[in-house]
Amino acid sequence: MPSVQYGPHTIHYRIQEAAHLKAHYLSVDQAEGVVLKGRPLPAAQADTLVLRKARWVLEKLQQVRALPSDDIVTGSRISYLGRSYYTEVRFLSGLPTPQVEFNHSRFLVTLCPNSGEVQPAIQAAIQEFYRRKAQEKIPPRVRKWAAQTGLSYQELKFRRMAKRWGSCTSTNTILLNPDVIRLPFTLIDYVIVHELCHTKVKDHSKSFWAELANHLPNWRELDRAVMDFQ
């Protein structure tokens, strides 16, 4: 990882190439640290760009390191479809309910400064975003996999679950945690097929894993990835 020296401080940074950008940008957040984004450039020029903003970078690093890890503030990261995105939090007087917008590169969370408990309001808005996107994007994939595997289900519902991505009831209703929308599509599909297989085999016996292997031969790798996803 490249670094520059600013007085007694060493600033480590990462380069994220983005050929479409006309200029270079620095970002600082809790998860990614210092990132220089833009077109490829020589190492000496990258160091110079970081040094020009060194005072600002050090101030931002101090701020984000002091943040509670669970709080959502400007500079936090929100996971969506397998990636982690920069988040900006804004306050707008008179806004009736918190809003979450996603423009494919960052999240914008807007809420009224008089919303009461700010963090619970932000968390609730993000959960509503996950629910809305899950209801939009996942049902077509469930129908596709049901047709492809020949495994039928009664209905699909979304329900918050503390420690599970999904479940299948005795009547073959598939329940999916809206948080599943945080996963990449490859792992969303694994959760879907996993629960579809439970319409045929209710437990995790050898018969179940054999059924799953019929449809996803690499199920072991996918299962580990789902379990490890944070």
Image (cartoon, grey):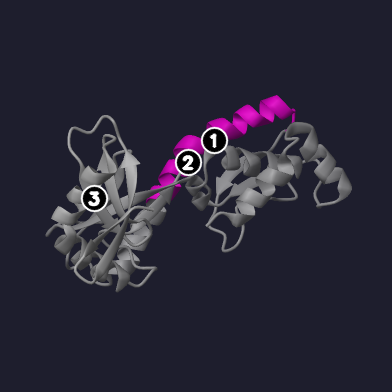
Looking at the image, is 55 positioned above or below residue 153?
below
Dividing the picture into quadrants, the one containing residue 201 is top right
Mark 3–mark 1 Cα distance, whole angstroms, equals 47 Å
Q: Amino acid at mark 1?
A: Pro
Tag shown at residue 139: 1
Q: Please give the name of the residue rendered at 62% of the width and 57% of the height, measured from the top-left corner.
A: 164
Question: Residue 2, image x and y in percent?
Answer: 34, 52
Q: Where are the magenta residues, as a range?
A: 129-151
Q: Tell me if I can see residue 101 in this picture.
A: no
Callout 3 amino acid = Asp
| Residue that label 2 marks | 135
Contact check, label 3 and label 2, Cβ < 8 Å? no
142 in the magenta segment: yes
**Label 1: few (<14), some or many (≥20) within 10 Å?**
some
Q: Is residue 69 left or right of residue 215?
A: left
Residue at the far front: name it. 44
Q: Position of residue 10 (x, y in %)?
A: 28, 65
Q: Is residue 182 magenta?
A: no
Kindly report the secondary structure that dominates the magenta region of the rendered protein. Answer: helix
Query: x%, y% of residue 33?
Result: 33, 58
Q: CA distance from mark 2 to mark 1?
A: 7 Å
